[in-house]
Amino acid sequence: MQNPHKLRTIRANQNDHIFARLRYSVAASLLVAVAIVAFIGEEVDPTLSMIWLGLTLAVAAFRFHSAFAYARDPHAHARWRHWHSRFQASSFAAAFLWAVAPWLLFPESSPIHEVLLVLGIAGVGGGAIATLSYDRETLTLYLLTLMVGTVSRLLMAQTTLSFQLALLVTLYFLFLIKGGLDIGASYLEMLRLKEDARENDLALLSTAERVARIGYWRWDMRSETLEISRNLALMCGRETNRVTFDECLQLVHPDDRRRVAETIEAVINTGAEATVEYRLRREGDADWVIMNQIITLHSNSNGEESLMGTVQDISMIKSAEQKIFSMAYYDELTGLANRGHLHEHLAEQIKHARRTGGHLALLYLDLDNFKSINDTLGHAMGDRFLQAFAAMLREALREDDFLARLGGDEFCIVIQDVQDGVTPAWAAQRCLSLGRQAVVLDGNEILPSMSIGIATFPQDGDDADSLLRAADTAMYAAKRKGKHGFAFYDRKLTEEATRRMQLESDLRRAVGGDQFRLVYQPKVTTADGRIAGVEALIRWEHPERGPVSPGEFIDTAERIGLINDIGDWVLETACRQLRQWQRLGLNLQMAINISSSHFGSPDFVEKVIEARHRHELPEGSLEIEITESVSRDPRLHIRNCQVLHQHGIHVAIDDFGTGYSSLSVLQQLHIDTIKIDRSFVQDLPEQESARLMIQTIVAMARGLNFEVVAEGVETEEQARFLCDCRVDWLQGYLFSRPVEAEEIPSLVYRFASAAEDTPGLPAAGRA
């Protein structure tokens, strides 16, 4: 049973540490609260944000008052229970306010503000370690409250980004709790050791080191030698437990040595405990690890003073923080700044230019030939090309130029302190010169071609959004001039509006002008490797422009109300073609992708049923693919799915995993098939997260009695993994690209013949 006096002393010392650091922790969290309201205040209800900020200020004021009152209380140690209860109550109040912040201040329509809110809460949780680690119970409840409030709100948002953030926040807070508990254990052990003799101190410190995986050192200041624990010796790559102060300092990063030395000197001069964070490298190791060190001054009964330090590796906590920051501000593929980071940087530079009367330029760059790279070499090769091109852009630009990837094949460059048009034009020419440098990928030489639009502040826009729009318009003007060139924005330009109007006019003529055609991509069964189905894909053959990809006209068709007419044509053409194949003895299933608006139109179901009967198609031979986001308006779509199902027409959820559907809605939709989006397949089998996602989707589909199709299969390894996961159908370039209707019979026979040679395996690579 522990000595009551010793327990009281330890608790009192804990309070000393807690209240000594409380004001700094509260100040930091208060700054974060103000920053969050300032940054996202326009995205949420201003009344709620002000109420929340007011309550936060009130709790912060109470905690500040507690810190100062504790310092002035001469009987604070005797009243340790009172002060500890007061600290816990105020901490839980603060935790509750931060936990409800995502519910009150969640920016539904702004992913970047959503990430900023999560980063703010994560920062508050990380900052709490400095104060709450002394009280492990309070720390655990505080961080769990923040985690539960944040994660539950993110999960309720039901977006891909929110799910990713929820996972990262959960891992991050678990790391914080684990690290904080370890640190708290070491703090508690140190406080206990103060009450023991020097010999017992060292023994107990050794025990704490083994339990908490920390290291400690002791320096008798009458000597130049430090005595370090066995674990700390291992952390430093030393074989002996005695080293000089200079030898230890040499292991610290050069940029941190002065701060470490000054912290130790301050402890010697003041006697106050201090904490310092620094980078340390083991002897013979190339990597730096981040250490957190607590330094205290001890005196024995003879008045002899010594320094004691407890060291812990906090690299994992810092890595988690950096990962969240990186996801929020940097593009995962190229490592460049992402769209959100660009927007933030551009807004800051515009503010600076407005204050100083300066000018800046924005270059909007779009690759001219990237789609052909994806179509010809595959998406994996396209990603490698983007990485190589991004590296070339970095080399071509000045160090001060800000480079970002907006997504896809679009990049932006911010150039500061522009005096005239020469500087941005020079930068554009530097980028265009990359067209003479071939990117070599697996023996394929690719010459980059790009179109660049240039807009300047303040002439072409007075904020980030308007400047981006101007540069984007100028980029399309450059494309119209013949590609691989650049153009400055001119307010008198009407080409963008003309282009949109021309596209709309051409689409209307195309609907009645026999300009559309269908191609078909086979779907292979994993059970026997045969082609048992195809997906119908629309193509537009423009009489002047040539082939126009669906990505260029589908959105426009939906906007001007032509998508239903196009969808009806696809349905009729695909059913007629399927009947022709059936007359040849081909038993295939035809998948037709239907837009959300078309699927929800009043007469859609009747048209599908009538087309199936008119062309005498067997039950199960026709499948309607709808996107997962259709289920955001579930009532009408549930009815449509039920009616189609009753008439022998299958329904599939396309691009599964990228939308917003819930399990309950999926069950009510009466679907037959889930189609896994290619974004999950492309990272197989290397990335563990992709493997886990595929396995989870397949397990869920099996539980709901759905078939599973995986699209975008490009490699043998992906096909083998998907077969092992019991995916039913595979579709992708590994088997065949989309082909004309007359090529399907020969493909079917070829795969059937190959399947007889190797039964039970997918016919990968045979097309």
Image: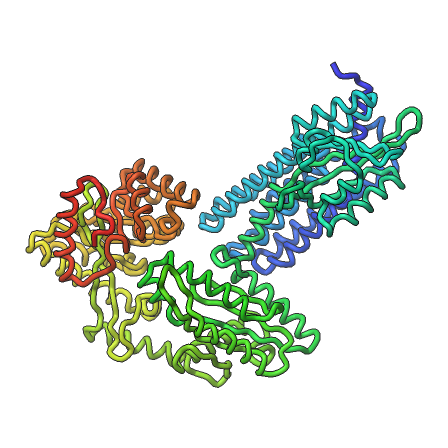
Q: Residue at x 87, y 35 (%)?
A: 221
Q: Nearer the viewer, residue 715 or 295?
A: 715
Farthest residue in the top direction? 1
Quarter of the C terminus within the rendering? bottom left
Vertically, is 110 above or below 91? below
Q: What colour scheme was applied to this rendering of the protein?
A: rainbow
Q: Is residue 647 left or right of residue 205?
A: left
Residue 687 x/y as whole percent: 43, 45
Q: Residue at x 61, y 83 (%)?
A: 420
Q: Is residue 214 left or right of residue 572?
A: right
Farthest residue in the bottom direction? 492
Q: Residue at x 31, y 63 (%)?
A: 376
Q: Residue at x 19, y 54 (%)?
A: 590
Q: Is residue 520 left or right of residue 466?
A: left
Q: Is residue 633 left or right of residue 652?
A: right
Q: Quadrant of residue 438?
A: bottom left
Vertically, is 492 above or below 754? below
Q: Quadrant of residue 545?
A: bottom left
Vertically, is 658 above or below 342? above
Q: Nearer the viewer, residue 32 or 157?
A: 32
Residue 92 x/y as whole percent: 67, 37
Residue 289 x/y as whole percent: 65, 43
Quarter of the N terminus within the rendering? top right
* Residue 633 makes an appearance in the image: no
Residue 467 x/y as whole percent: 54, 74
Q: Nearer the viewer, residue 163 or 433?
A: 433
